[in-house]
Amino acid sequence: MPKFNNFRGSFPATRLRRMRQSEWSRNLIRENHLSPADFIWPIFIREEGLDPVITAMPGVVRLTIKEAILEIKEAIKLGINAVALFPCVDARLKSEQAIEALNPDNLICRALQEIRSAHPDIGLIADVALDPYTPHGHDGVVIKGQVANDPSVEILCQQAVLLAKAGAKSVAPSDMMDGRIGCIRQALDQEGFSDTCIFSYSVKYASAFYGPFRNALGSDKTLGKQSKASYQLDPANMDEAMREVALDIQEGADTVIIKPGLPYLDVIRECHHQFSCPIHAYQVSGEYSMLKAAAQQGFLDFEATLLESLMAFKRAGACGIWTYAALEAAKLLG
């Protein structure tokens, strides 16, 4: 240790490790905290008789409506307050104009109604997009080889109203069409759903991390090698992402979602600095599956790396976290 004859007091005067010595003192200076109430749990809903197994997402299965009701009961006990529903639509019901998306008796509408009846206080979030309902797997209708913005928005508005009528507390447009937030807000208000929230996927990158999700919905087979780069964001762009957020807030979004999560912590942080609005991070399927696969090989401790990655979202500025590991994380925190 260096000796300083003229130095008064101990060396060094400031020792940051003092408060790291014990768990109680570490807890006192912890800047961010995780809680099960931070989590939104995405659930894949299927019809009876369809395959529940999702090979690309270890530990995640497609649930029937009855199974989802039971699983949500467990989630509520763990302190999770919100779930997001994604339908696995029978290929025979898919069409170029996504007609099944506007069927009031479709799978997701029935799921919303039955879950709302069983669990009236749970936050039900419904995805607004056409990719589960189209044979090509795009988030909008395709006209002359292009994803058509305005015709897609018209259908999305009708879909959002239908989902609100079925019991969704929030609709989550994930399509990335221009102007859809303002149009959906207007459509909801005109139909008497002014209290229905819009959780907007304002920043949805054209990412390779969505692969397991598309496998779960079956859109990997329909989309094939096609790209969604004509409407989803270029992973190289930050300023464009902030423009998307600004537009969505102006149009009436209640919360903005940034997707994927961990590879885009800088985007979450920048959004947190620029805008005083709630921000959600989505730990997407590829992020989840990487952790699971590495843990299965013995390369990582899944529980430790899961909580560390979720805390990273909070530290970056997210107030809500979408994760397929919500139940596992809630149990660890409990």
Image (cartoon, grey):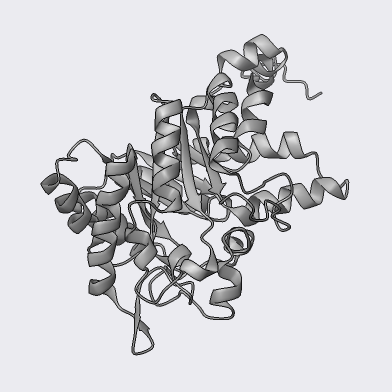
Q: Residue 47, how many percent across, how many down?
A: 56, 51
Q: Residue at x 22, y 66 (%)?
A: 154
Q: Residue at x 28, y 43 (%)?
A: 164
* Direction from residue 38 to residue 214 in the image, left or right: right
**Quarter placement of the N terminus:** top right
Q: Residue at x 54, y 75 (%)?
A: 223
Foreground residue among 301 and 61: 61
Q: Residue 322, how many percent across, how many down?
A: 51, 42
**Quarter placement of the C terminus:** top right
Relative to 139, is 159 above or below?
Answer: above
Residue farthest to the left, as pictured: 190
Is residue 268 shown to the viewer in this render?
A: yes
Residue farthest to the bottom, as pictured: 144
Q: Residue 333, how many percent across, how many down?
A: 64, 22
Foreground residue among 220 and 90: 90
Relative to 140, is 279 above or below?
Answer: above
Foreground residue among 171 and 90: 90
Is residue 32 shown to the viewer in this render?
A: no
* Direction from residue 98 to residue 48 in the image, left or right: right
Foreground residue among 245 and 50: 50
Q: Residue at x 88, y 46 (%)?
A: 298
Q: Residue 252, how many percent across, how many down?
A: 20, 48
* Direction from residue 286 to residue 247 in the image, left or right: left
Quadrant of the rendered structure where residue 233 is?
bottom left
